[in-house]
Amino acid sequence: MLAAAPTLAAGPATAPTWAQLAPQQKEYLAPLAADWDNMVPEQRQRWVMFSQKYPTLPKEAQDRIRVRMQRWAALAPDQRAEARRRWKEIQQLPLEQRKQLTQKWLEYDNLPTASKQRLRETPAPKKSQ
């Protein structure tokens, strides 16, 4: 179905504009539409490759990814920069610490909405220097 999708064999410089995407790709990547043409070619290329895998994912995974794309698209540029900075920081941690963070995140993610809201409103403890 995505056979009409733009080819990426020529490299990142040929990453398609939003107008060049196939209708089904636009459907899958809709949360990114407003930012698409401002993304660097490498980002667009990764999303195009992802859009080819999207229909094979289980419905739950598709829903989760769509929500995450919507959340990302709603972030301001400075919030995205902070998220990228934190991700890079986490990638530098030892594997065991990353696993602990993942576990803590899963625990948080499973909390009821009201509990999450209370945690968000609670000031973070100050780091000792």
Image (cartoon, rainbow, N blue to C red):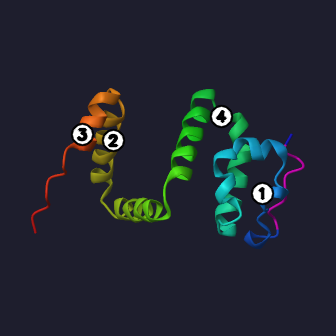
Other-residue count near label 1 (Cα within 10 Å), few / some / many at <14 / 14–19 / ≥20: some
Q: Earlier in the sequence, mark 1 or mark 2?
A: 1
Q: Earlier in the sequence, mark 4 or mark 1?
A: 1
Q: Residue at x 83, y 57 (%)?
A: 19
Q: Nearer the viewer, mark 2 or mark 4?
A: 2
Q: Is residue 32 left or right of residue 74?
A: right
Let me know if residue 7 is in the magenta part: yes
Type of amino acid under label 3: Leu
The mark found on residue 57 in the picture is 4
- Residue designated by label 3: 119
Marks 4 and 1, how far apart at CA? 23 Å
Marks 4 and 3, how far apart at CA? 32 Å
Local secondary structure at mark 1: helix
Tag count: 4
Extent of the magenta region: 2-9
Q: Earlier in the sequence, mark 1 or mark 3?
A: 1
- Residue designated by label 1: 18
Q: Position of residue 64 (x, y in %)?
A: 54, 35
Q: Position of residue 56 (x, y in %)?
A: 70, 35
Q: Residue furthest left?
A: 128
Type of amino acid under label 1: Trp
Q: Nearer the viewer, mark 3 or mark 2?
A: 3
Type of amino acid under label 2: Trp
Marks 1 and 2, how far apart at CA? 34 Å
Q: Residue at x 69, y 59 (%)?
A: 36
- Residue designated by label 2: 105
Other-residue count near label 2 (Cα within 10 Å), few / some / many at <14 / 14–19 / ≥20: few
